[in-house]
Amino acid sequence: MKKILLLSPCFLVAAALAEAPLFESQLIFDPEQAMEPHGHVHASCIVECPNGDLRAVWYENGRELPAPYLNEQQDKAANVRIGAARKQKGMTAWEQPFVMNDTFGVSDNNPCMVVDHKGRLWLFYPTLLGVPGWSWGSSVLQFSYASRYDHPGRPIWDKSNLLIPQVSGFDDVLQTAVDMRKAEGWPEEQLEMVRKKVKASIDRPLATRLGWMPRAHPIVRNDGAIVVPLANENAATSCMAITNDSGDTWTYSNLVPDLGISQPTIVQFSDGAMSAFFRNDSGRIKRSDSSDGGVTWGPVTKTDRPHPNAGIEAIVLTSGKLLLVYNDQEKERDSLAISLSEDRGATWPWTRHLETAKGERFDYPSVVQGKNGTIHATYSYNLKTIKYAQFNEAWIMEGDK
């Protein structure tokens, strides 16, 4: 009789720890040698495709616009486009960057991608209609998905459409946030100022329909539904857009019960529970949790992770550990760290830095784990290009040297 060898959990943990540390990094493109200028380069997202290719997107300055689209006030703000590049499986270098999308006359920003259970590549990005007077708050969200993208350049899109959330409960979130700040000891005059400012913003026509911005990866829920984390620039709060029919219809979570939170990154644990982590100005990353697939979100609390109000991203690794990549200072963005937790973010025993260089800027990270366990990350590199790094858990757990 053929014997079956069963590996104990302890053996598997030991094997993971015995893995040799891996780290490699490179610029996706050299801004000094680029075939065409890219200008301000920022806010990348990376995915691994089913065939093993890597794809990255970001936003950058695009074509020069003629009058009346371009004037002294708008300058470079109205000609922003989505740039992209591919790293073919087995190749050491990224291919020549290309334009993923460029909506004429307006600015496309903050792209994010995800590969769904059917192997389709989704792209989400906001287009700003009111630059410069009403910039981020004037955004309208667009999305596309493609079944054919195992080739250089832009995917062949199966479908493209708008995603315009219709969410209620803004007044309730405002009251909850004011009550929270009151309990923290804020003076009444400051609370009244916040109340009036937010109320005036959300009472603007279309303010709660426009201004929705993605940033971090959407996730594919265990049941195949796509959950897109969004924040509203007019109301300074967040919610999740959910579709389980390829974007034909959408439902929305409750508003996360706090103000001043943006650019959520969400993770799903093996039991289906979810956590969201938020950019904010408190000096610490904030979080909220959901037990129903991201439909409702609980109270917002502070983590112990330092934070300069910059982009972050979290993923759950195949090992079960929670990974967080973030700027680990309260003010500057010249230090970019990766932390690991084995208790869903209660503690973070391991931290290692991707970058530390005083006075420089490394921010808006994106991270994904490949099928072979390698972790892939991209991030803005001094706003001139996107830097790519690949590494493994062993490298993180080795710590800074």
Image (spheres, rainbow, N blue to C red):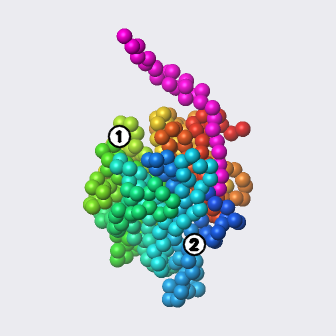
Please tell me whether residue 23 belongs to the stretch shown in magenta.
Answer: yes
Q: Is residue 277 above or below residue 134?
A: above
Q: Percent from the top left, x then y, of residue 139?
A: 43, 71
User: Callout 2, which amino acid?
Assistant: Asn
- Residue sitting at 39 percent across and 13 percent down? 2
Q: Percent from the top left, x then y, of residue 63?
A: 56, 77
**Pointer 1 and pointer 2: residues touching (CB < 8 Å)?**
no
User: Where are the magenta residues, as a range?
Assistant: 1-27
* The disc label shown at residue 155, or none: none
Which residue is disc 1 drawn over? 272
- Check the picture and name the quadrant holding the C terminus: top right
Please tell me which residue lies in front, 167 or 27. 27
Q: Is residue 97 above or below residue 46?
A: below
- Residue sitting at 51 percent across and 21 percent down? 11
- Residue sitting at 44 percent across and 57 percent down? 149
Q: Is residue 1 left or right of residue 353?
A: left
Q: Is residue 257 visible?
A: no
Q: Is residue 153 left or right of residue 381?
A: left
Q: Percent from the top left, x then y, of residue 242?
A: 32, 55
Which residue is disc 2 drawn over? 61
